Image: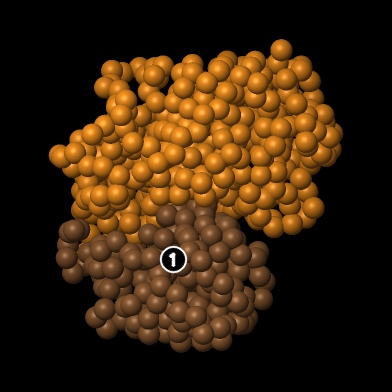
């Protein structure tokens, strides 16, 4: 995966199912190009404490349908700005999933995890595995389509297109 | 092997027969971004080396989500969009021209059989036109604007077949709310929904847009209404599924006995018959949005409010979906009926739908809205509650001060 970091060891922040983009970043904060301003409001209607406790590199873990709702790319951007290094969910809403890959925020789909709040996780992005060090369980994520692996390997779609000029399969 | 509508549209574009599950890179017929997604799109476009959009006639920018600009930060983003449109010689739809999805259809940026990519999650609305339309985020849109192409996985299709005719006083909004309740907010993730059957055949284009619009609320990649009965003022070639097309799932409903529906806080699939919520006190009634801000929606509200006054404890906001809807509602008398009844008219655009301006509810307040989403905080205040219903339900509830079945005003 080029120069991008592929091994992450960090703490899990665990939330539930159907976390919509309004809860990830409310619409009223989205109209900006000052991306650092997004971090202050990330998840504020879900957990007002999140932006105070999140540490650089932490991992966000959720249930099903993470990121449903709007197409706002500000949702994965806000998480990335807040320091989140990877999002793990049972499954994702499709626009959020594409957006996250496009901006270079790794997302892993693990259909049946039982990761608990505060767990220490070790993620290997290259292998697509997540090890819950507290529970001593290793999960395997669903494989991404090849083109998404290519985009993520370049660090996002901007770099991918700057390099290749066009899409290829 | 038989094909679904989306397999056919994608096959035509890529020049060979493709089926669900295949990855394709397809040319597109149009793209658009709004003032929520546009500024980031333009930033990404420049960052990826974009100089010229692939075809200025097929690209549009729309200022609708915060129009007119409520503060200097957003005013500057609007200016950035105007400057870009000028430089690229592409069309920018100004404040008040309307909501992105409405103007794309009215101005024929999208037509039957097209593939359209919009940087807004309700882009599937154009499935009303027998088109394949998907929402994406800003960076994806920038890439499509630059290359004229997008990569997609050919989606599997869910077929929703509704037999029976809707009763008088029951509308397309009630039908789609009912379906969202059944399929759930993630029931169609990554998939196309094909809507077919008698219940859809007599629907107007506006009502079909209401149906396709809320495909997004089921997680779908796109939602396409079967073209049977679709009347347009230009000729088109209808794309219909083959009899032996493969569906991943099929739903069959008889909707002839359907009652008006309500989606209760705080998820669009929390849907029940209106009787479960009749009597819920409301503070604020809103009719507008890409879901239900068209002429037929304003007309039905006016039919209920004609010669009456809304309840003194309720305020009512109307945001026509476009300038052309507004002009029609002025010339047929609907607009004066609504205003005489006590409603307040705001600029055509998204208005309070997305919580940026023009009518944020107070703490503890209850909203009855004709929009498509009622997530917590959606209208700008996480301490308010949003109920979704048909424009008829919103109007009747504004009159009485609590949620009420609009049927008695319509029969
Ligand atoms: S009216 Fe509401 S749902 Fe429709 S495009 Fe505007 S903000 Fe989105």
Which of the pair A147/B84 is nearer the observer?
Answer: A147
Mark yes or no: residue A113 visible: yes
Q: Is residue B139 above or below residue B316?
A: below
- Number of marks in the rendered image: 1
What is the letter of the brown chain? A
Q: Residue at x 46, y 22 (%)?
A: B197
Which of the pair B60/B400 is nearer the observer?
Answer: B400
Instruction: Give the position of the N terminus of chain B as an image quadrant.
Output: top left
Q: Residue at x 69, y 56 (%)?
A: B381
Subunit of label 1 = A
| Colour approach in the figure | by chain
Q: Position of residue B206 (x, y in %)?
A: 49, 25
Indicate left or right for B185 with B155 as reference.
right
Q: Position of residue B291 (x, y in %)?
A: 54, 35
Which of the pair A104/B381 is nearer the observer?
Answer: A104
Q: Which residue is mark 1?
A: A109
Indicate left or right for B278 with B65 as reference.
right
Mark yes or no: residue B77 visible: no
Which of the pair A19/B105 is nearer the observer?
Answer: A19
Q: Residue at x 59, y 60 (%)?
A: A17
User: Based on the displayed image, in which of its 4 quarters is residue B402 positioned?
Assistant: top right
Q: Secondary structure at mark 1?
A: strand
Residue count near mark 1 (Cα–Cα under 10 Å), binned few <14, some 14–19, many ≥20: many
User: Based on the displayed image, in which of its 4 quarters is residue B128 positioned?
Assistant: top left
What is the letter of the orange chain? B
Q: Is residue B330 above or below residue B1?
A: above
Instruction: Give the position of the C terminus of chain B as an image quadrant.
Output: top right
Q: Is residue B177 above or below residue B308?
A: below
Q: Position of residue B72 (x, y in %)?
A: 53, 60
Q: Position of residue B259 (x, y in %)?
A: 68, 25
Q: Residue at x 48, y 40 (%)?
A: B215
């Amino acid at each position: 995966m080029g120069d991008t970091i592929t091994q992450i060891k960090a703490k899990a922040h665990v939330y539930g199912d159907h976390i919509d983009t309004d809860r990830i970043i409310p619409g009223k904060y989205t109209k900006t190009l000052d991306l650092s301003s997004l971090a202050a409001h990330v998840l504020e209607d879900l957990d007002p404490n999140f932006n105070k406790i999140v540490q650089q590199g932490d991992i966000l873990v959720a249930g099903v349908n993470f990121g449903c709702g709007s197409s706002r790319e500000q949702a994965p951007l806000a998480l990335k700005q807040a320091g989140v290094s990877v999002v793990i969910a049972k499954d994702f809403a499709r626009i959020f999933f594409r957006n996250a890959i496009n901006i270079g925020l790794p997302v892993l789909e693990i259909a049946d995890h039982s990761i608990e709040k505060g767990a220490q996780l070790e993620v290997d992005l290259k292998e697509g595995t997540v090890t819950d060090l507290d529970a001593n369980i290793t999960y395997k994520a669903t494989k991404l389509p090849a083109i998404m692996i290519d985009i993520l390997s370049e660090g996002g779609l901007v770099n991918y297109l700057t390099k290749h000029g066009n899409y290829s399969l | 092997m038989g094909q679904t509508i989306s397999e056919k549209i994608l096959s035509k574009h890529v020049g060979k027969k493709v089926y669900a599950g295949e990855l394709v890179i397809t040319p597109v017929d149009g793209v658009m971004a709004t003032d929520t997604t546009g500024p980031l799109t333009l930033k990404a476009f420049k960052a990826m080396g974009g100089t010229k959009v692939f075809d200025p006639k097929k690209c549009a920018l729309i200022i609708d989500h915060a129009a007119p600009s409520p503060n200097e930060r957003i005013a500057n983003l609007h200016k950035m969009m105007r400057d870009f449109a000028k430089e690229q010689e592409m069309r920018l739809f100004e404040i008040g021209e309307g909501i992105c999805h409405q103007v794309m259809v009215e101005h024929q940026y999208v037509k039957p059989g097209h593939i359209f990519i919009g940087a807004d999650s309700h882009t599937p609305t154009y499935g009303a036109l027998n088109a394949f339309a998907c929402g994406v985020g800003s960076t994806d849109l920038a890439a499509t604007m630059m290359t004229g192409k997008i990569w997609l996985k050919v989606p599997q299709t869910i077929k929703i077949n509704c037999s029976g005719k809707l009763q008088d006083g029951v509308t397309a909004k009630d039908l789609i709310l009912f379906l969202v309740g059944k399929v759930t907010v993630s029931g169609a993730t990554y998939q196309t929904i094909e809507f077919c059957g008698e219940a859809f055949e007599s629907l107007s284009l506006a009502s079909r847009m209401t149906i396709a619009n809320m495909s997004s609320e089921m997680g779908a990649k796109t939602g396409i209404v079967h073209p049977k009965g679709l009347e347009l003022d230009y000729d088109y070639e209808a794309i219909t599924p083959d009899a032996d097309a493969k569906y991943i799932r099929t739903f069959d409903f008889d909707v002839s006995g359907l009652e008006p529906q309500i989606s209760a806080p705080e998820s669009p699939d929390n849907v029940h018959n209106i009787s479960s919520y009749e009597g819920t006190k409301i503070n604020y009634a809103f009719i507008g949005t890409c879901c239900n801000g068209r002429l037929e929606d304003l007309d039905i509200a006016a039919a209920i409010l004609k010669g009456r006054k809304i309840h003194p404890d309720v305020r009512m906001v109307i945001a026509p979906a476009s300038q052309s809807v507004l002009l029609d509602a002025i010339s047929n008398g609907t607009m004066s009926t609504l205003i005489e009844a006590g409603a307040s008219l705001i600029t055509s655009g998204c208005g309070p739908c997305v919580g940026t301006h023009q009518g944020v509810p107070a703490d503890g307040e209850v909203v009855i809205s004709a929009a498509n989403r009622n997530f917590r905080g959606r209208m700008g205040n996480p301490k308010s509650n949003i109920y979704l219903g048909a424009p008829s339900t919103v109007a009747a509830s504004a009159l009485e001060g609590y949620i009420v079945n609009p049927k008695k005003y319509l029969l």
